[in-house]
Amino acid sequence: MTQPRLGFIGIGLMGNPMTRRLLAAGFDVTVWNRTPAKAAPLGEAGARVAGSIADLVEGVDAVLLCLANTAVVEEVVFGEGGVAQHGRAGQRLVDLSSSDPAATRDFADRLESECGMRWVDAPVSGGVAGAEAGSLAIMCGGDAEDIEAIRPLLAPLASRVTPMGPVGSGQVTKVCNQMVVGCQAAVLAEMVALAEASGVDATRLVEALAGGFADSTPFRILTPRMAASDFADPPWHLRTLLKDLDMAVAQSQRSHSATPMSGLAAQLMRAHASRGHAEHDPAILVEAYRPVGEGDEA
């Protein structure tokens, strides 16, 4: 069976390693990025670098997106010269971004109405390390037939692909994931600061608590960075986590489901982001609790 030709839009922290894994798996991949310089190295790795979205869409069977937020997804798909203007029936769009669930449902209807393309929302969890290792968890929303059709192209990227229901369900599931991650990040900052203020060596917390009920992936990633005030070269950004918590609160309003913890974590992150920390690692949240003058950031 001939492998589908893939187009990948969004060559960032996650898009780059995911594209490289698809190339290594033998897929024919065409890439496009709003900042062309980020796509150029993938040309050297075997991808075809498209000059425009139209060029990309016309030569592929499926279009994969990995973009910063819902607004960028809308611009790339429905903006001037976007995917919707050049797509055709028989193609599928796979959105690996973390996008708003309600907007995703609207986008899917619009895209199929305008050009016949089918939409699968397939947000990912696992970070850059998971993208590099091909061990991402991918949660999918869409028709069962569409999800089954894209499984082979997700295989090089993920250790697990889980159908969650109709279009938008994958994004709701990712929101649930980020609620846990975001609230953990907020309480981990409190925990590290409390340990330090109480005279405990916070750099030993991971060793002490590993394997217990407090252990988790965010705990193992964020706690050492908080304790060491290591905020350089962030593998993810505070603004991204804040964006996802804001989507959780918005979804809670639509579904009449209370999210007080997620809302509080979002407000803490918003306050810290407004002080110039939006582009920093979420570990920077610990600085909100330290006395001024301690750590590397005031």
Image: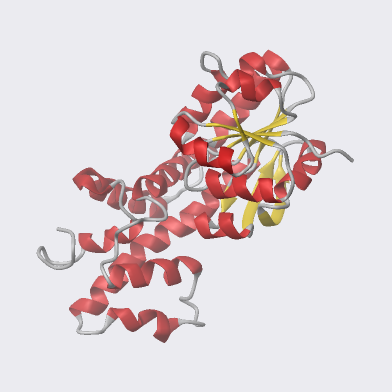
- Can residue 43 be seen from the camera position used here? yes
* Residue sitting nearer the eye, 147 or 19: 19
Residue at image position (75%, 29%) is: 61
Task: Tell which of 41 and 231 is nearer to you.
Answer: 41
Relative side of 217 to 53, left or right = left
Instruction: Work out whether residue 12 or residue 252 is closer to the camera in this orientation and state it.
Output: 12
The vertical placement of 195 against 116, above or below, is below
Name the quadrant containing residue 44: top right
- Is residue 11 toward the left or the right of residue 112 in the image? left
x and y percentages locating residue 284 in the rendered image:
28, 59
Tell me how many marks there are: 0
Residue appearing at x 73%, y 52% in the figure: 155
Rendered-image quadrant of the N terminus: top right
Task: Tell me: residue 212, above or below residue 140.
Answer: below
Residue drawn at (14%, 68%) of the image: 294
Q: Nearer the viewer, residue 261 or 101?
A: 101
Residue 109 appearing in the image: no
How far across and how far down the image is residue 164, in percent? 70, 47
Identify the residue at image location x=54%, y=51%: 176
In the drawing, does residue 269 fall left or right of residue 9?
A: left
- Quadrant of image for the C terminus: bottom left
Which residue reaches farthest left? 293
- Look at the picture and state if 19 lies above or below 202: above
Q: Position of residue 219 (x, y in %)?
A: 43, 70
